[in-house]
Image (cartoon, rainbow, N blue to C red):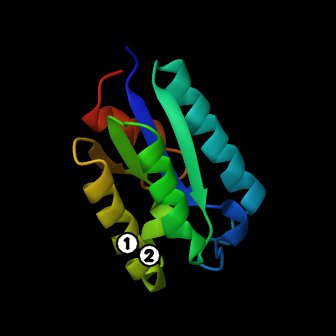
Amino acid sequence: MAKRVLAIGIEPGSADYSAFPQLTPDLVRGYIEAQLLRLRDLGYEVTSCLIDLDAAAEAAVTAALRDERFDCVVIGAGLREPKERLLLFEKVLNLVHRLAPDAAICFNTTPADTAEAVQRWVDA
């Protein structure tokens, strides 16, 4: 049976790229899609949960975690930075901890290394 992965990140159109002028929403979306495809090619079943930066974010994460059981939850770097997102990051992390207590939690460092983050904690 394939290991199940939930990938939580900021909807690329909602992200602030001022600190990363080389990135655009389309480029980040492309990286995300490539990593989800790569994970699937590696044998994982992957669900994407892209959230906005408003009150609906917690509801989206809660719904994703309640709908399925996951072996691993990867939380994107865009959710952890900039520091103004700390409260949202903590809310998401605590939802994962409460609703998926058996899942490994991992973090990518860019939109292009999600597969490596998952592989650190879960074998396909």
Element class at badge 2: helix
**Relative image position of residue 9 (x, y in whole percent):** 53, 57
In the picture as drawn, the residue positioned furthest to the left comes out as: 102
Return the residue at label 1. 91
Indicate the amino acid at tag 1.
Lys
Of 53 and 115, the residue lying toward us:
53
Q: Give the quadrant of residue 90.
A: bottom left
Q: Is residue 11 left or right of residue 42?
A: right
**Relative image position of residue 101 (x, y in whole percent):** 23, 48
Identify the image quadrant of the N terminus. top left
Q: Is residue 81 left or right of residue 15?
A: left
Return the residue at label 2. 88
Identify the image quadrant of the C terminus. top left
In the rendered view, tell whether residue 47 sits above or below residue 4: below
Residue 110, visible in the rendered structure: no
Identity of the residue drawn at 59% across and 70% down? 56
Identity of the residue drawn at 46% across and 79% down? 85
In the picture as drawn, the residue positioned furthest to the top comes out as: 1
Indicate the amino acid at tag 2.
Leu
**Relative image position of residue 44 (x, y in whole percent):** 45, 24
Identity of the residue drawn at 64% across and 45% down? 31
Q: Is residue 54 left or right of residue 68?
A: right
Marks 2 and 1 sit apart, C-alpha to C-alpha, by: 5 Å
How many marks do you count on the picture? 2
Of 68 and 109, the residue lying toward us:
68
Contact between marks 2 and 1 (CB within 8 A): the answer is yes
